[in-house]
Amino acid sequence: MATACSQCPLRKRGIFDPLTDAEVRFMQKFKTGELQVEAGAVLMMEGANSPHLYTTLEGLGLRYKTLETGERQVINFVLPGDFIGLQAGVMNEMQHSVEATTAMKLCVFNRSGLWSLFKEQPGRAYDLTWAAAVEEHLLGETLATLGRMNGIERVARVFARLFDRGRSLGLVSGREMKLPYKQQDLADALGLSLVHTNKTLKKLRERQALDWQRGVLRMLDYDRLCEIGKLEADGPLPTRPLL
């Protein structure tokens, strides 16, 4: 059975802004169902005009763009709570693809109902705009990381960010987080070769910062990892909307 918006497990996480009763009712009306996919399924294809929008309820995925050479540039990592398909909703077609890394469960929204959100729920429309602005910010940060940081700084930074996100979503147990991405996914995200990525991970293990093997991230020294990645070891992440 589909999860009722009033019972959404993600709403219990402190990382997400609370919704009013009216907003919950609207989202229930906006939602058309749920989709479960297996690992490896392509949710959205670059250039396609999908009739649906999604919010990730469970599971992990990747956003990526395929280059003319056939190589892949990973844009970012999809975690629970992420909204998928806004580009198709606004630009009529996707500019990148989205693939499931693990089995995923997604809330499904009809794209044709997107404009009713702007008419009936201006607060939710602002949340959508906020999500788009944050995505632009993250892409800018990624560009700066690729252009100005060396390999070990890039890897340390992305793992610190992923660990922060995972912790806010309840995906971290103690110092461990299930993170079943491949080294090739990480290499494609950071503009590194697979060999360089493997050697960099070994260096981070030797420095007792982290250990990532067999799909499990073990955080050995969070402060050291942030120092290597040129990040402040911040407290809890700021809250954000859940669409």
Image (tube, rainbow, N blue to C red):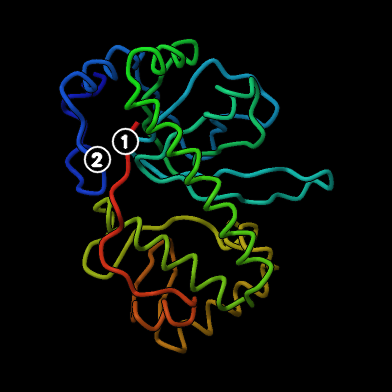
For residue 31, above or below residue 192: above
Q: Residue furthest bottom?
A: 207
Q: Which of the marked residues, 2 or 1, is nearer the chain's N terminus? A: 2
Q: CA distance from mark 2 to mark 1?
A: 7 Å
Q: Residues within 10 Å of mark 1 (few under 14, many from 20)?
A: many
Find out whether the residues at labels 2 and 1 contact each other: C-beta distance under 8 Å.
yes
Q: Residue 150, percent across and down?
A: 64, 77
Q: Residue 199, percent across and down?
A: 61, 80
Q: Residue 94, percent across and down?
A: 64, 29
Is residue 224 shown left or right of residue 228? left
User: Where, quadrant-wise, is the C terminus in this rendering?
Assistant: top left
For residue 39, above or below residue 185: above
Residue type indicated by callout 1: Leu
Q: Give 52 or 186, whichever is nearer the viewer.
A: 52
- Determine which of the numbered discs, if any, sits on residue 174 in the image: none
Q: Residue 116, percent across and down?
A: 40, 11
Q: Which residue is mark 2?
A: 17
Which residue: 34% across, 80% down?
A: 223
Is disc 2 placed on a helix, strand or loop? loop
Is residue 225 shown left or right of residue 138? left
Q: Give 102 or 33, whichever is nearer the viewer.
A: 33
Q: Which residue is mark 1?
A: 242
Q: Give 45 or 178, whichever is nearer the viewer.
A: 45
For residue 229, above or below residue 166: below
Residue type indicated by callout 2: Asp
Closer mark to the observer between disc 2 and disc 1 = 2
Which residue: 59% across, 55% down?
A: 140
Which residue: 45% across, 67% down?
A: 159
